[in-house]
Image (cartoon, rainbow, N blue to C red):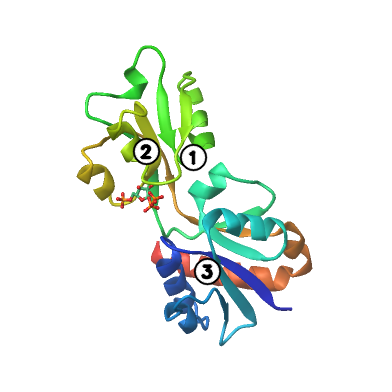
Amino acid sequence: MSLAVALTKGRLEKSVTAMLEECGYGVQKLKDKGRALVFEDTVKDIRYFLAKPNDVITYVEHGVADIGIVGKDTLMEGGKDYYELLDLKTGECRFILAGLPGNNPLQKVGHITIGTKYPNVASEYFHRHSLDPEIIKIDGSVELSPLLGLCDGIVDIMETGTTLKENGLVVFDEVCRISARAIVNKVSFKMKRDEVMEFITDLKEKVNEKC
Ligand code: PRP
């Protein structure tokens, strides 16, 4: 039986493709892809497609993809109807609380406002601190929101820290560490168990080699 694998476009694309290549998968076309979104593996019986992070979860939950590779940040914020089987230990970054120097929202007395692309992650983090801020959903360039005075701070992902630094923002706290994960459709895990486990095991061996 063939496998359908949804890969996340953008940030994770390069490192995940490199990992698949190291596992001996035929992913050359993914590296020279232009604007194409669907690719056949030239070695294995696998079809890959590239999607936005939230859509990777949607495709896996609906069984259009048997397996999805997506960041833990998206998984923490989104649906839960899948099995999370592997930490690929690539695409590593952190969820952080940040803001303008001297303006730590955790130390503010009174109404707190937080800008974020991840409202659920932000709410849960503040609840752990017994705080209930107003969460304002921002779709991108979240760093702008405290600069413009929309909010006291942001909960966002930080990889190199360059975006924060270049916009004069500082980290107040680390919420958690995140990385790429492999998720599997629940039916595929039963019906295509051998194929799914072969794929996961190949990746797992590669992850272990690197640790
Ligand atoms: C993410 C994140 C930060 C930036 C952090 O945004 O929201 O803005 O990357 O990366 P850095 O620490 O390496 O600078 P992304 O690039 O995904 O774009 P977006 O802001 O449009 O969502």
Image quadrant where one finds the N terminus: bottom right
In this view, the mark in front (1 or 3)? 1
Q: Is mark 1 on a helix, strand or loop?
A: loop
Residue ID at (48%, 83%):
29
Residue, disc 3 = 203
Q: Within 8 Å of ligand 1, the CB of disc 3?
A: no
The answer for how far apart the CA atoms under marks 1 and 3 are is 28 Å
CB under 8 Å between discs 3 and 2: no
Counting residues from the start of the chain, the first of labels 3 and 2 encountered is 2
Corner quadrant of residue 114:
top left
Residue ID at (61%, 69%):
5
CB under 8 Å between discs 1 and 3: no
Q: Where is residue 10 in the image (x, y as percent from the top left)?
A: 43, 63
Q: What element carries label 2?
A: strand
Amino acid marked by disc 3: Leu
Indicate which disc residue 118 carries: 1
Position above or below: 145 against 73: above
Corner quadrant of residue 148:
top left
Compare residues 7 and 100 and report the one nearer the observer: 100
Indicate which disc residue 96 carries: 2
Q: Is mark 3 on a helix, strand or loop?
A: helix
